[in-house]
């Protein structure tokens, strides 16, 4: 699919470029030809003013930029030529053929394309004078223009084709990434749902068996209930992540005291950390105000605290909140333990990503940090993690008032 999308992108670009080049070259050709025709017609008009003075054709017109000559046809059918041209105007057969072709067109002005001659017929009482201007050089100019435009067009198309390939790769890259993420997401979600579904089906089959001991029925029912809660938690997490990705959390934004919210969020976690031999301390700068959703800001900090409680080694977990420059604040949660590998720091906020892949039965689906990332971005903030030899630290930067 991505390859077809990239190909369509290139084809659309090439069609647009081709249409633009054709329009530009056609415009250049049209105005060039119109300008040359105007020059030729002006020359014929000027020469036609001198038809009553045959001597004027004995010497070249210094203002004329094109070869020209005239044929004066008398009432007796005699033909008198004057002027100069690339053609042999002394050839009576050739001159008569030109005159016949002019009369055959039955127009006072026109073009003999075969000979590249433009003419005008000037009549008086005693004779008719046909003025010819040789436009071979103009036709050569137009032919050269067409060749130059064709060459430039082909070179431009080749250049734009290379550029389009690069742009197609660049433009489709986010789609390719999203497609791979979606495929990975479906695979991970299926894997997470497979285990509880298998447990539920197995226990349901055992309950349905007539040989199932009564004493085990309660345990089987409890297993089904536990796995059902686990599936419900997964589905709710996916729905929460979808709402966060769609930006639906912005509907609940209000102005709030973030310092107080962080302090209130920490209180329920103190017993949890105490049971895990962890000490929870905080350094919170007062009166940091911002605009956001109290529920989702609490959820962001809860995710970070929950991860610290699960993966931190016994020791001190420090939560800091302070202003950072003008218009922003920085929330950090530092905990001791094994440092997160550098390559893991780039993927830890992905969906179904776990710090410890061996821990799959603790109720964690690897969605928490992904939800926290989406919620932070909806608040126009940034979230990232850093590691050091003694532990890890998660940062959340948010705009404040």
Image (spheres, grey):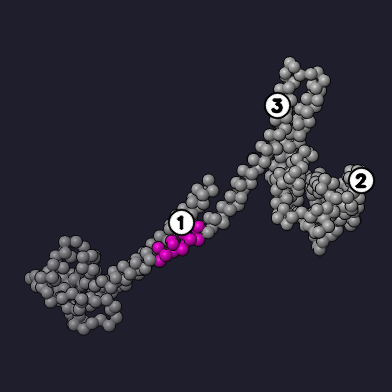
Q: Quadrant of residue 79?
A: bottom left
Say how many tags the image has.
3
Instruction: Kindly tell me whether residue 1 is visible in this rendering.
Output: yes
Q: Residue at x 87, y 52 (%)?
A: 317
Q: CA distance from mark 1 to mark 3?
A: 56 Å
Q: Compare marks 2 and 3 and give the one earlier in the sequence.
A: 3
Q: Which residue is mark 2?
A: 274
Considering depth in this image, is 322 or 108 the residue closer to the camera?
322
Q: Magenta segment, which residues?
A: 152-165
Task: Pick the quarter of the image with the C terminus.
Answer: bottom right
Considering depth in this image, is 12 or 118 the residue closer to the camera?
12
Q: Is residue 238 above or below residue 206?
A: below
Query: Would you call the spot at circle 1 few (<14 residues within 10 Å), some (14-19), or many (20 or more)?
Result: some
Q: Residue at x 71, y 22 (%)?
A: 205
Query: Would you call the spot at circle 2 few (<14 residues within 10 Å), some (14-19), or many (20 or more)?
Result: few
Considering depth in this image, is 156 or 370 the residue closer to the camera?
370
Q: Compare marks 1 and 3 and give the one earlier in the sequence.
A: 1
Q: Residue at x 76, y 19 (%)?
A: 212
User: Which secondary structure is most common in the magenta stretch?
Assistant: helix
Query: Would you call the spot at circle 3 few (<14 residues within 10 Å), some (14-19), or many (20 or more)?
Result: few
Q: Which residue is mark 1?
A: 14
Instruction: Kindly tell me whether residue 288 is visible in this rendering.
Output: no
Q: CA distance from mark 2 to mark 3?
A: 38 Å
Q: Quadrant of residue 193?
A: top right
Where residue 55 appears, x then y in whole percent?
Answer: 18, 82
Q: Is residue 18 left or right of residue 297?
A: left
Q: Secondary structure at mark 3?
A: helix
Q: Residue at x 90, y 56 (%)?
A: 283
Where residue 363 appears, x then y in whole percent?
Answer: 78, 38
């Amino acid at each position: 699919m991505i390859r077809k999308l990239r190909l369509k992108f290139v084809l659309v670009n090439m069609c647009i470029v081709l249409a633009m080049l054709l329009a530009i070259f056609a415009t250049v050709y049209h105005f060039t030809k119109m300008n040359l025709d105007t020059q030729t017609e002006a020359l014929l008009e000027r020469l036609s003013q001198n038809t009553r003075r045959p001597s004027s054709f004995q010497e070249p017109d210094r203002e004329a930029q094109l070869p020209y000559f005239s044929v004066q046809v008398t009432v007796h059918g005699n033909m008198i030529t004057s002027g100069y041209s690339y053609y042999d105007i002394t050839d009576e057969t050739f001159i008569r053929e030109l005159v016949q072709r002019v009369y055959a067109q039955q127009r006072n002005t026109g073009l003999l394309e075969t000979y590249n001659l433009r003419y005008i017929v000037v009549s008086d009482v005693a004779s008719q004078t046909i003025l010819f201007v040789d436009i071979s050089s103009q036709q050569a100019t137009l032919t050269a223009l067409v060749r130059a435009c064709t060459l430039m067009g082909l070179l431009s198309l080749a250049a734009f084709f290379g550029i389009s390939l690069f742009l197609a790769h660049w433009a489709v890259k986010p789609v390719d990434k999203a497609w791979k993420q979606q495929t990975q997401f479906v695979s991970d979600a299926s894997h997470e749902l497979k285990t509880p579904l298998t447990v539920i089906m197995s226990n349901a089959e055992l309950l349905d068996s007539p040989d199932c001991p009564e004493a085990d029925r309660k345990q089987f029912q409890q297993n089904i209930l536990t796995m059902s809660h686990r599936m419900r938690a997964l589905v709710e997490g996916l729905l929460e992540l979808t709402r966060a990705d769609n930006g639906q959390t912005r509907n609940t934004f209000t102005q709030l005291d973030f310092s107080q919210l962080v302090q209130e969020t920490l209180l329920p976690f103190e017993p949890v950390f105490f049971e895990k031999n962890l000490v929870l301390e905080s350094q919170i700068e007062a009166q940091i105000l911002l605009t956001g959703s109290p529920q989702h800001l609490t959820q962001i900090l809860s995710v970070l605290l929950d991860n610290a409680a699960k993966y931190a080694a016994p020791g001190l977990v420090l939560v800091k909140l302070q202003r950072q420059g003008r218009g922003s604040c920085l929330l950090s949660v530092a905990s001791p333990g094994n440092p997160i590998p550098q390559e893991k720091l780039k993927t830890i906020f992905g969906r179904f990503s776990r710090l410890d892949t061996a821990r799959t039965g603790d109720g964690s689906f690897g969605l928490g940090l992904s939800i926290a990332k989406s919620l932070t971005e909806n608040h126009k903030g940034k979230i990232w993690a850093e590691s050091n030899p003694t532990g890890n630290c998660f940062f959340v930067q948010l705009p404040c008032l």
